[in-house]
Amino acid sequence: MANNIGTGYKRVGGKRMWNADSYQTGAMVVQNWTSPSSSSWQLFDRKMDSIGGKDVVKAIMVQICILSQRATDKELRDMVNAARQHVNPGTHIYIVGQPVYNAGHECFIAGNGGAAWTDMKAQELANDPTINENMSYLGKFILDNDAGEVSDGCHASSPKGEDVLGEQAKAFFGG
């Protein structure tokens, strides 16, 4: 879903966040990001290198994306700690949950209440003084399934839903 945000962000003219070009993180959930040596982090490092490396990137967005069994608090912390190992000290982490949906719609992949749970956990982590060094909650991404912004019950439709997420990211980042 972060891929949907990055794709939409580029399409709507966002300039501050890196785009999703050649950064295929689809189907990756928290458990793919808990080990600093995982293939997910290797993909992250390649993307980071392609845009100029750690010295260019001053902030990253980490998204809590889950399957219906969710993630443990330890796995969430491990994911954040792994992120810190792939950026320079002092790099800011914006943490977010996966998009939430209009009333009455749930993502079947995340399970009933799963999307809202990821947003709640992002806020909890951002407010936890034991882990929140240089980390803040970015905001809530929202998709409206009834307006055609969701393609498969969970992911943003292209281009409409991606563009909605991209505009929200622009608002969060200020451009």
Image (spheres, rainbow, N blue to C red):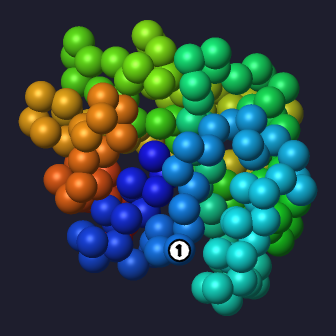
The one nearer the camera, 113 or 94, is: 113
Kindly give the residue lying farthest to the left in the view shown.
Answer: 147
The one nearer the camera, 77 or 134, is: 77
Viewed as shown, does residue 74 lie left or right of 53? right
State the image quarter where residue 77 is shown: top right
> What residue appears at the point 52 percent right and 50 percent down from the top-left corner?
26
| Quadrant of the rendering where the C terminus is positioned | bottom left
**Circle 1: is it few (<14), some (14-19), or many (20+) Cα within 10 Å?**
few
Q: From what the image shows, is residue 124 above or below residue 68?
A: below
- In the image, residue 63 lies at what x, y percent? 57, 44
Q: From what the image shows, is residue 21 above or below residue 140?
A: below
Task: For mark 1, give the secondary structure.
Answer: loop
Would you say residue 112 is visible in this rendering? Answer: yes
Residue designated by label 1: 22
* Three-letter code, disc 1: Ser
> What residue appears at the point 71 percent right and 76 percent down from the top-left corner?
46
> What residue appears at the point 27 percent right and 72 percent down from the top-left corner?
11
- In the image, residue 154 lies at what x, y percent? 36, 32
- In the image, residue 150 lies at what x, y percent? 25, 38
State the image quarter where residue 60 is shown: bottom right
Would you say residue 95 is visible in this rendering? Answer: no
Number of numbered discs present?
1
> What residue appears at the point 57 percent right and 55 percent down from the top-left corner?
25
